[in-house]
Image (spheres, helix red, strand yellow):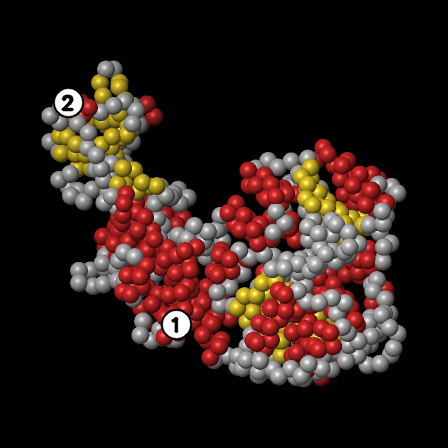
Amino acid sequence: MGTVGVMATLSRLTQVSVGELKGIGSSRLATLAKSGIRTVADMLHHVPRDYLDRTEVTPIAKTLVGPEVTVVGEVRSVSSRRARGNLQITEARIGDDSGEIKAVWFTKNYPFRKVKEGDRVALSGVVERFRGSLQMKTPDAEVLDEAPERILTGRIVPIHPQVGKVSPQIIRDAVHNALKRSRPIDDPLPVEFKAARGLMDRDQAFASIHFPESREEIGPARKRLVYDELFRLELALAMKRRHMILEAKGTAHAPTGELAGPFLDRLPYRLTAAQARVLDEIRSDLTAPHPMHRLLQGEVGSGKTVVAVASLLDVIEGGHQTAIMAPTEVLAEQHYLGVNDLLAKAALSPGLRGEGERLGMESLFSGEEDPAVHLGLLTGSAAAANYDSGITRPQLLADVASGQVDLLVGTHALIQEGVAFSRLGAAVIDEQHRFGVAQRVRLKEKSDGAEPDLLIMTATPIPRTLSMTLYGDLDVSVIDEMPPGRSPVRTRLLSKAEEWRAIEHIEKEVGEGRQAFVVCPLVEDSPKVEAVSAVSEHRRLSLLMPDLRVGLIHGQLPSREKEEVMASLRAGELDAERLEVEVGIDVPNATVMVILDADRFGLSQLHQLRGRVGRGSHPGTCLLLADASTQDAVDRLDAMVGSNDGFRLAEEDLRIRGHGTVFGTRQSGMNDLVLADIMADLELLVAARRDAFGLVDSDPELADHPELAEEVSSMLGETVDWLFIA
């Protein structure tokens, strides 16, 4: 560790085991490692959760019973004795010019054993009266002659978070030892950034966050360390973005309009202004020579699919293949049917003969001509095509490899061995948070030569704060406008005892020709979780509503059975459907969504489910059945009732959960932000992003800032690797 005249860097401290610190043996080393504290750098970022103000020294005679105080005096006597249970009791009388107090400790392994008669000591603790005399039980004590740098008394004393059985006191001593042996810590941040942002020096920030001389130092110290954490992340994102733009080989598409033109002209509606704006943004990317990496956000029903299909048609016009990858078979099949329906309306596809009719979407015209756009579906259990109703899986794979398939829709089956594209030019990944990074990389590898353009599409609103942090390497488009005529879904919260109200509402809507969904969180009954299961709920609802045709769908059903249930629902052959949580369900005639045990769902899940009703000409109602037992659950349900704005709900969800695992929605296993709270620190996030991207613009490889480059790599570790291949 640091020696006199040697400047330590944060990167070097990531290479020093926390086991080098005083008081951290093998057992404590293992405990700390489980919580992610493996190096001295990790320990320095384990900042106090609170502070005790022991700066004021009180004369012994003026101490009050109750509050904690700090006194300084001379040890006038020390005695020890053993009590029952082999407990050692040590007592010391400490006096100053005003009076005397007794200190008592009930243990045998504490630094006070060094206290001896004649020592000048400082004590901090709670004063009480015992048999008419002043007394402190187990106070913190420091011998002033031996400890000129006091860390327990007469100063602001840090309280570090406990880690397992490693106490705050042990951690405090280890941090003090780390600072003593590693300071001064180098500061690689450009001076102009520190001046512009009003940031203190890094070395002082570490000292002040752990052992401040005054409370006024704590805020500026935290600000500097939070900025550093965000700045490192944004540097990684900026370098990745620069790499993609300048080094990644893409395709500059030159659309002719022969497919996208008729597609847009023959839609039964006009694109909203938001859809048109986003389509222009995507088209600008497609004509550039570097690969597109764009995130498309939009509420359920906002028209993301139409924009995505129009974009893919631009790519197909140039002779390239395209793909849409969805996380579940239900969603993949829904995309297949929905895309073909859109193409059929533009006379680019004859509709789905045979298979499509069985799925509840009859052919829109009966011609047998070869479609202008060859569309295929590939999942783990299904293969279909709009140009061959009897296509087999081997034939579909051969058609993809030969380039005959223009647009292939599927699940992760698209990236399995045996699936080879002839010339993949663009891919849409829907609900991408359901995919791991490695899966997205394999999709890229399906392209021969140039990287395909990538459009990441999600109906889960992402707060601006998360979007900047998680997707700072991507361009972001938002469809923030719903198509005209869509009424907001009315949301009501009911107790479980009021379930009869939900049954009444379902029966009323079904009686008027509409349909309903009932959602519950489990498929099978579980003795460990008090939640309704899909299977038992289906049986129960069938008994409660004997006049209604109730279907069942969930993720564990075979694909064929799911298709049949969905086809029956779309065809109006079912009145209500009990389903496990699935995205991609699209039944315009559905107007009621009942969510059982709604308190067990996340806010984004609830909002997604609500968006599945009221998509036709009739308004929708979402009924939340729950007896919430936690404040977080109450807050989530209240937020759902109070707003239909997905982005506002996303911000509220982040507020309720805290920033938590920031990378959790992108790639499991990444570390949390340790110090930053992206809600509270939004201003610093914006500043760090601006500084990082500006620095990379002027110094793309950080050649003039090697310590920063080394720090990003050493501090983020594998996170950097994930960022650079996502």
Q: Give the answer, above or below, for where 123 lies relative to 445.
A: above
Residue 521, image x and y in percent?
68, 47
Q: Amino acid at mark 1?
A: Val
Report whether residue 395 is seen.
no
Q: Which of the two residues, 624 or 17, is positioned nearer the viewer here?
A: 624
Label 2 neighbour load within 10 Å: few <14, some 14-19, many 20+? few
Tell me the CA gap for discs 1 and 2: 65 Å
The disc label shown at residue 721, or none: none
Count of marks placed on residues: 2
Q: Residue at 87% across / 77% down in the picture? A: 367
Q: Residue at x 31, y 64 (%)?
A: 193
Q: Is residue 683 left or right of residue 136?
A: right
Residue at the image point whose x is 17% and y is 63% from the top? 5
Residue 472 position in % (x across, y down): 48, 65
Mark seen at residue 696: 1
Residue 483 to residue 68: above or below: below
- Kind of residue sitting beneath label 2: Gly
User: Is 518 displayed left or right of 675 in the figure?
Assistant: right
Q: Quadrant of residue 186?
A: bottom left
Residue 99 is labelled as: 2
Q: Nearer the viewer, residue 230 or 345?
A: 345
Secondary structure beneath label 1: helix
